[in-house]
Image: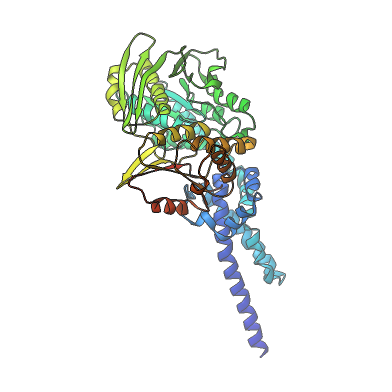
């Protein structure tokens, strides 16, 4: 009888250990995903972790991290090393509890699983720093071996990715061009592009430079040493990490510090750029500012596309047409035209490439199915981009439906700017489908203050619920604007 009891107790240890390990692994994977989305910044991850309790719930029980993620966990070498270190810590802790015959306390490890990636990140920090420095040094070596390479640093609070795509298409009319793919705009994303993709045949390298923290852009410039710089916009984005608009202005203009004999291309329609004094060789472009070197006039916009005429300071002009919609796209294309023309491509040679331009992924991409047109503007919304998307929505015929979770990373201005989004939406859509409970209240307040029908405002827990409702709206013709799709860590 005693042996049977011992066997049962031993079986309990195995069962508890097995179940605990499975649950721990699930929570650990979810948490390491969030840490990756938080740029491996322990302080940012801790802030996220101890925000609302829903973050903890999503981490413990899978939540949206188990659904198809907008940006799934990437099993980089760093993540694999961190996972190995986390597992070692877990097994040491588990063995210690078993040795103390406290194995019944092992399920507590599941509760603390979100902290294990942070501990692993701290332990691995010297290794990661050494690895990163090695990769960065190699990228610098590659760049320095190509003195003939023209590198163009493109940055901005919004519009930089679209402009980068357009610029590559236009410059490819004459040059062999490499650009950082997708939204590769961090230090290691740029390093990876240089080490893996830069070929001796490339003549121009378009390097998108993102930032979330002070010093991010300077770090990238130190690697690629840009010949020319381009600032597409400055606005209230990343206020959560940057704190003030003055910090954002300084960080964006840090791209110009590396420019010696090159040119800084500036969007003078942006008030923060226009008002900033810069002692560099500059070329200014815009559609609403008179003191520019490249100006777009005679702009006509419809749901079928946009037409405009470009006037260059040297007297050259050309009329352009594009399938892209919205004045903001004219700004982005105009910037790409300014750079391309300055680098030796005649305006007339750019007419066909402009006509063939397609929207960057998830940036006012238009998809038509049956009686429904979807305007996919789901990539990281910002105040200016949201305004442009709502202006585009107004161009279409049919029942207009807005689906949005609002905007994030706006710091103390979050409520004010999301309310302004609601005010703008009131004159642009027939239905407002708000996702999540965080940004919905100020958006709803903005809508109702402008007299929007409250019966056509609905709040859903998930995008899928909102999309299902939109699909169920009975109308001969529908236009659905998907404005923003929050990162998985929001």
- What residue appears at the point 39 percent right and 39 percent down from the top-left corner? 361
Q: Most extreme residue toward the right, as rendered?
A: 100
Q: Most extreme residue toward the top, as rendered?
A: 314
Q: Nearer the viewer, residue 146 or 33?
A: 33
Residue 167 image point, x, y percent: 38, 26
Q: Quadrant of residue 43?
A: top right
Residue 187 image point, x, y percent: 52, 34
Relative side of 126 to 206, left or right: right
Colour style of the rendered protein structure? rainbow
Q: Nearer the viewer, residue 455 or 13?
A: 455
Q: Nearer the viewer, residue 398 or 227?
A: 398
Q: How many numbered discs, if any?
A: 0
Q: Most extreme residue toward the bottom, as rendered?
A: 1
- What residue appears at the point 51 percent right and 22 percent down from the top-left corner? 270
Relative side of 322 to 22, left or right: left
Residue 18 image point, x, y percent: 57, 70
Whether residue 483 is visible, yes or no, is yes
* Vertical side of 434 occupied by 12: above or below: below
Relative side of 68 to 278, left or right: left
Whether residue 142 is visible, yes or no, is no
Which part of the image, by quadrant, shows the N terminus?
bottom right
Relative side of 28 to 331, left or right: right
Q: Quadrant of residue 325?
A: top left
* Vertical side of 378 occupied by 299: above or below: above
Residue 42 image point, x, y percent: 63, 45
């Amino acid at each position: 009888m005693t042996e049977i009891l011992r066997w049962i107790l031993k079986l309990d240890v195995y069962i508890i250990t097995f179940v605990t390990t499975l649950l721990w692994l699930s929570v650990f994977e979810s948490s390491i995903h969030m840490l990756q989305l938080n740029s491996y910044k322990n302080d940012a991850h801790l802030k996220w972790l101890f925000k609302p309790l829903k973050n903890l719930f999503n981490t413990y029980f899978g939540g949206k991290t188990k659904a198809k993620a907008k940006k799934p966990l990437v099993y980089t070498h760093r993540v694999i090393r961190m996972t190995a270190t986390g597992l070692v810590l877990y097994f040491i802790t588990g063995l210690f509890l078993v040795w103390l015959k406290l194995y019944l306390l092992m399920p507590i490890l599941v509760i603390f699983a979100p902290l294990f990636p942070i501990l692993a990140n701290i332990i691995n920090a010297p290794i990661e720093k050494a690895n990163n420095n090695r990769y960065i040094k190699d990228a610098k070596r590659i760049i320095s071996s190509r003195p003939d390479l023209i590198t163009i640093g493109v940055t901005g609070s919004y519009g930089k990715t679209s402009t980068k795509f357009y610029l590559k298409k236009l410059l490819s009319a004459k040059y062999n061009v490499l650009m950082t793919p997708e939204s590769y705009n961090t230090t290691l994303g740029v390093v990876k592009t240089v080490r893996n993709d830069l070929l001796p045949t490339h003549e121009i390298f378009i390097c998108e430079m993102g930032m979330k923290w002070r010093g991010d852009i300077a770090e990238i410039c130190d690697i690629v040493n840009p010949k020319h710089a381009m600032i597409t916009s400055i606005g209230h984005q990343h206020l959560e990490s940057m704190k003030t608009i003055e910090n954002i202005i300084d960080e964006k203009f840090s791209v110009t510090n590396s420019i010696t004999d090159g040119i800084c291309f500036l969007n003078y329609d942006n008030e923060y750029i226009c008002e900033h004094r810069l002692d560099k060789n500059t070329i200014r472009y815009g559609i609403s500012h008179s003191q520019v070197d490249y100006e777009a006039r005679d702009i006509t916009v419809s749901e079928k596309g946009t037409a405009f005429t470009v006037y260059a300071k040297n007297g050259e002009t050309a009329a352009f047409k594009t399938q892209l919609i919205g004045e903001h796209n004219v700004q982005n294309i105009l910037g790409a035209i300014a750079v391309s023309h300055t680098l030796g491509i005649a305006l007339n040679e750019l007419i066909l490439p402009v006509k063939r331009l397609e929207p960057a992924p998830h940036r006012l991409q238009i998809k038509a199915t049956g009686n429904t047109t979807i305007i996919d503007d789901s990539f990281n919304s910002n105040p200016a981009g949201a305004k442009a998307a709502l202006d585009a929505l107004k161009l279409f015929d049919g029942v207009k439906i807005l689906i949005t979770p609002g905007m994030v990373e706006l710091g103390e201005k979050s409520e004010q700017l999301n309310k302004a989004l609601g005010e703008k939406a009131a004159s642009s859509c027939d239905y407002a489908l708000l996702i999540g409970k965080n940004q919905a209240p100020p958006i709803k307040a903005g809508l109702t203050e402008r007299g929007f029908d409250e019966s056509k405002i609905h709040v859903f827990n998930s995008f899928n619920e909102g999309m299902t409702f939109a699909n169920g709206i009975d109308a001969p013709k529908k236009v659905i604007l998907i404005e923003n799709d929050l990162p998985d860590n929001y």
